[in-house]
Amino acid sequence: MLPKHNSIQRDQLEMITLDQLVPANHMVRKIEAAIDFTFIYDLVKDMYSEVGRPSIDPVTLVKLTFIQYTFGIRSMRKTIEEVETNMAYRWFLGYGFHDKVPHFSTFGKNYERHFKGTDLFEQIFYRILMTAADRKLISAEHVFVDSTHVKASANKRKFEKKIVRKETRAYQGRLQEEINQEEINQDRENHGKKPFPPDKFDKEEAKEIKESTTDPESGYYVKDERTKQFAYSFHAAADRNGFVLGTIVTPGNTHDSHILEPLVEQVIEKVGKPEAVAADAAYKTPVITSYLFGKEITPASPYTRPRTKEGFYRKHEYIYDEHFDCYLCPSGETLKYSTTNKEGYREYKSPKHICATCSSLSRCTESKDHQKVVTRHISQAYVEEADHLRTHQDVKPIYAKRKETIERVFADAKEKHGMRWTTLRGLKKLSMQAMLTFAAINLKKMANWTWQGPKMA
């Protein structure tokens, strides 16, 4: 028998409440039960004037953005369209069947008039995080750091070429540079060398970059031949439960290692000092490992393959003698200290006249003057200690958790929360997007974990 559905029910008149139309286990019910959004009134009370027409409820505005970022809706225009027909979203916002939904431009106008230049979204992010911490959901003794690229709202073919200062050191910040300058000069003096004058460090090295004419604050990112685009980097730190503890947004051409220190400092200030920090090979630098050990934080880093050209001796085959401060080559010859350069690397050079007649020269160097140069950073001992700890029974499992924590956060953010690309432009607005996306992820996780479900009558 072929059944036919009767469409007359479309005109059926019923008496029903909005609450009855929202499923008992819908995400908006879990979110509403997890946090009281009225805290927003205290955050925005100084952002509004006492005169003029009443503005739209700021709690409603923030809830609109959480609908967008929690359910991965691609724009505020589309979010408003969804709210008009979705009874669960109307229930979450406190709107009735016939209440007029705000125009999609309302949030943008309020951002420009009230929220721009404030730390409102950062405060909302940390309020949700602290609520999760109060409920014992945060476990911040191990922190996992990484970054992901978000495609900018900019045509990769519309750019200008500019000459800018080249960053030659794997750290930023004037204070940190001064500290390392002192260490470099001290190392030179310890080896009988004259210290570098200040202008030697301040000398700017130029490089040519592509700057987008659409979004100048984005950065040109090249991953391979097929992936060349303007993008932003979203740097984040997560705990072992997958809660995001902090985030920083930079142009897409900023190296990951530049951001670990300020990101960890952010976590220390807002959440507390971790016992260990796990990060991939991009963060395994002398400056970063020395910073972590200086903070009494254990670095959990991966194995890094030797980058030596095939057929040549690997760097670990040149043995460092700490007592005599020299290297021994595989043939037993001594490479003596020569100098410490302004990047903080000591240079050890072999004797040219001996190397010229060495039977292993072809495996050692292609230098025209037959001299092998091995470099060693003044903080290299910290990298070696991190390598030693890498296989420790307490450290190895920490790094293994990266794929279950920060990597899963980024995967969920891109797949479920619309973070694969952006329609916004500028670092300020992208920072807002990062804060709201990660706040939505934290809130969603907290809501699921604390949900008690409907009580039986």
Image: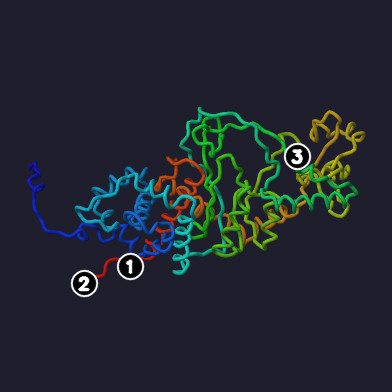
Percent position (x, y) of residue 209? Answer: 61, 32
Name the amino acid type tagged 2.
Ala
Kindly report the distance in space between the C-alpha atoms of the residues bearing marks 1 and 3.
62 Å
The kind of secondary structure element at disc 2 is: loop
Residue furthest to the bottom in view is: 457
Contact between marks 1 and 2 (CB within 8 A): the answer is no
Rendered image: mark on residue 452? 1
In x, y percent, where is residue 140? Answer: 54, 63
The image position of residue 449, as x and y in percent, is: 39, 63
Real-space Cα separation, disc 3 to disc 2, in angstroms: 75 Å
Give, as a three-letter code, the residue at label 1. Gln
Read off the residue under disc 3. 203
Q: Is residue 143 above or below residue 103?
A: below
The outermost residue toward the right is 353
Please give the label number shown on residue 457: 2
Q: Earlier in the sequence, mark 1 or mark 3?
A: 3
Q: Residue at x 11, y 58 (%)?
A: 15
Mark 1 or mark 3, whichever is nearer to me? 3
CB contact under 8 Å: marks 3 and 2 = no
User: Along the horizontal axis of the image, is 175 left or right of 160?
Assistant: right
Give me the residue at 90% from left, 34% from top.
352
Indicate the quadrant containing the C terminus: top left, top right, bottom left or bottom right: bottom left
Q: Please state, as top left, top right, bottom left or bottom right, where the N terminus lies in the image.
A: top left
* Residue 92 pos. (x, y %): 29, 57
Q: Residue at x 29, y 56 (%)?
A: 93
Residue lying at the far front of the rendered structure: 51
Residue 182 lies, with reference to residue 105, above or below; the image says below
